[in-house]
Image (cartoon, helix red, strand yellow):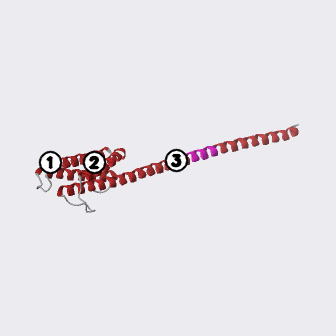
Amino acid sequence: MAFEWAPVVTGSAAIVGAVAGNLTSAWRESKRWERETKREELRHSRETEREQKKARHDFNLHWSERKLELYESVLAKLEELSTLMSRLWRNDTLDDGSTPTAEDLKRVQREFALLQTRARLIASPVVNNSIEEYHLASRVWVQRLARINPGEPWTSKINEATSDLSAAYKKVLTTMQAEIGAAS
């Protein structure tokens, strides 16, 4: 009778071995799957982070370029305004040979005001304040000029206004340079 149980025990052992082997294989596969899933999630999170950094960099670069363009325009307009005011005072001619008029000054001031509006949208409060200070200093200069007859010697009030205007220009320039990271 012992002989009859041998195939059953052997078969049972084979079945238990097969089941245990399958369970072990399934457990290993499950662990491998978990490792791959974690690795894939980590890779995906790193890739997402890298894409977000690139998007932030591109965004910052875009607005830095826009600021630089705006600041170039503002500075060019400030120089045009200063040159026009100086030529108005000296009763000097413009590059085209014409004599500057109050209308020329108003036109440049309007163009400057448009740039100032754009700056309010893009520039920092520090830069906007320095532009506003320049604008006020230029208005004071023009008001003082209106009270003096052309050709009269410079008065202390015009000298003071010119000094204030020059200081305001330097402040605009240095605040813009600081904001864009340029050396002053």
Q: Quadrant of the N terminus?
A: top right
- Kind of residue sitting beneath label 1: Arg
Q: Name the spot of residue 159 as percent of width and height, x first.
A: 14, 52
Q: Which residues are magenta?
A: 31-42
Q: Which residue is mark 2?
A: 131
Residue drawn at (15%, 54%), measured in percent from left and top? 150
Q: Name the spot of residue 147 as percent of width and height, x first.
A: 15, 48
Q: Mark 1, residues whose alpha carbon is within 10 Å: few (<14), some, or many (≥20)? A: few
Residue drawn at (30%, 56%), measured in percent from left and top? 76
Q: Secondary structure at mark 1?
A: loop
Q: Mark 3 or mark 1, which has the lower sequence index?
A: 3
Pointers 3 and 2 in contact (CB under 8 A)? Answer: no
Looking at this rendering, what residue extends furthest in the top direction?
Answer: 1
Q: Which residue is mark 1?
A: 147
Residue drawn at (22%, 54%), measured in percent from left and top? 85
- Kind of residue sitting beneath label 2: Ile
* C-alpha span from label 3 to label 2: 40 Å
Q: Which mark is residue 48?
A: 3
Q: Nearer the viewer, residue 184 or 128?
A: 128
Pointers 3 and 1 in contact (CB under 8 A)? Answer: no
- Discs 3/2, front: 2
Q: Is 44 positioned to the left or the right of 10 in the image?
A: left
Q: Is 175 positioned to the left or the right of 156 in the image?
A: right
Q: Can residue 94 be found in the magenta stretch?
A: no
* C-alpha span from label 3 to label 1: 65 Å
- Kind of residue sitting beneath label 3: Thr
Tell me if residue 104 can be seen. yes
- Discs 2/1, front: 1
